[in-house]
Image (cartoon, rainbow, N blue to C red):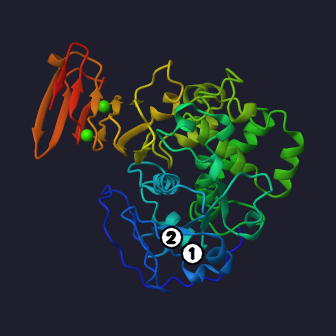
Amino acid sequence: MLTIGLVVLSLVVTSCNRDTDNPLTPTAPTTPNTGTGTTTGSGISTTIPFNLGSVYTNNFNRYTKVTTPNGGSIHIVAQSNLTNEQIIRCRSILEHYLTNYPGSQYGADKSAVANKMAENNAILCLLNGQDDGNNSVGNQVSGQPLYQNEIQVEGHSWYMNQDYTHRDAAFEEILHFVHDNGIGIDGANTLPGAAPAYQAEIRAAQQNALSNNLWGIGQDSWIQELTQENSLSQEYFASVVDSYYGLWGAWTESATHGMWGMYVGKTRADMQTDDPMGYALMNNKFFHPYLTYNAQISASLNGNFSLKFDTSKPYTHHSRYLKDVTLLGTNNNTVTVNEMDNKITGNSGTNTVIFSGTSTEYTVNTANDVTTVTDNTANRDGVNTLTKIEKLQFTDTTINL
Ligand SMILES: [Ca+2]
Ligand SMILES: [Ca+2]
């Protein structure tokens, strides 16, 4: 990634009800150059800050950012065909990667990594179409590219069907964004990073995987290219992170491998036996075991969204790692909880939350329009906090709130 000249002007930080352990605040972007942009409640502006440069102001029509602990900005720009749902989803993944993970070896305080991204003028570029060379803007931007056709949104048909022709590349590309600009890469052609000890472990796991044919399987010419450009560790780590968060569990072309077949770990469970060094990179090091963002479930969903792993619903290989969700739109959707302490927010429709046991096995309390449903059976549904939910479905009965 190249850097561009950028002066971060004064920023106004607005609180958006973030988790208190998150050093990052998604802010309605300030527009130091002009007052003409409109900012929605989602923190997306229609003005691109002029100081990003003309390639950005001419080719992108929406902007959002993550504000770092030192007051800097990690920029996200989007072209015309991106939906706001996609933009928010990408920002959420970035926030997830940068959310402090208390007690972990390298992630207890991610301030330095986030600050380094701002210092490196990191820009995430959400581009129209796909990575096929037809979008000329892709060659003009210096930031991290991510294409519209490879960004799934929870609840949208691409996600619900786990459509690999619209494979969800957001986790991979935003990981590269954080890795290149924040964690830092050892060796040539790199930006200064803030977590060299973690990168040393990533490098060691990559070298082990390559020499033992755990990764890069059948990709010899590509591996040569990556070696020349010093991007082996980034691409290996993306395979690790993708499989860890369940992105390849639904892929039917291999029963055993992830990342288009080039990685031995298909699921989190596989990784522990097939690539223990890769699994160790995810085990209490930097990244949370679950997805920390509150997933905005696409308004296009009409039916059930399950957080609970269910082999009959392949997308649950991935959704099982979500904890908190918010239903958008007006459909009378339902949500099935998982073993974590879920926060479920309904929409304007009549929404049902689905539990695993009988009604007598739970304690239900409602106060100030918030209902808490506690499973009295250990290690099953946990403590669930519900807002704008109208019904509770148990295995024996459904209760109206
Ligand atoms: Ca739960
Ligand atoms: Ca509702």
Type of residue at label 2?
Asn
Location of residue 87 with respect to 285 vertically, above or below: below
Q: Quadrant of residue 189?
A: bottom right
Residue 27 in the image: state x and y as whole percent: 40, 68
Residue 196 in the image: state x and y as whole percent: 61, 60
Which of 69/156 is in front? 156
Mark carried by residue 115: 2
Residue 213 in the image: state x and y as whole percent: 79, 32
Taking the view exactly as shown, the residue that stands out farthest to the top is 396
Q: Quadrant of residue 393?
A: top left
Marks 2 & 1, CB-CB < 8 Å contact: yes
Gap between marks 2 and 1 measured at Cα: 6 Å
Which residue is located at x 41 percent, y 47 percent?
A: 296
Asked which secondary structure carries label 2, the reply is helix
Location of residue 37 with respect to 211 vertically, above or below: below
Neighbours of disc 2 within 10 Å: few (<14), some (14-19), many (20+): many
Q: Is mark 1 within 8 Å of ligand 1?
A: no
The residue that disc 1 covers is: 119
Q: Is residue 385 left or right of residue 269?
A: left
Q: Quadrant of residue 267?
A: top right
Q: Quadrant of the N terminus?
A: bottom right
Which residue is located at x 57 percent, y 65 percent?
A: 194
Type of residue at label 1?
Glu
Residue 326 in view (yes/no): yes
Which of 109/333 is in front? 333
Location of residue 256 with respect to 70 vertically, above or below: above
Which of 91/279 is in front? 91
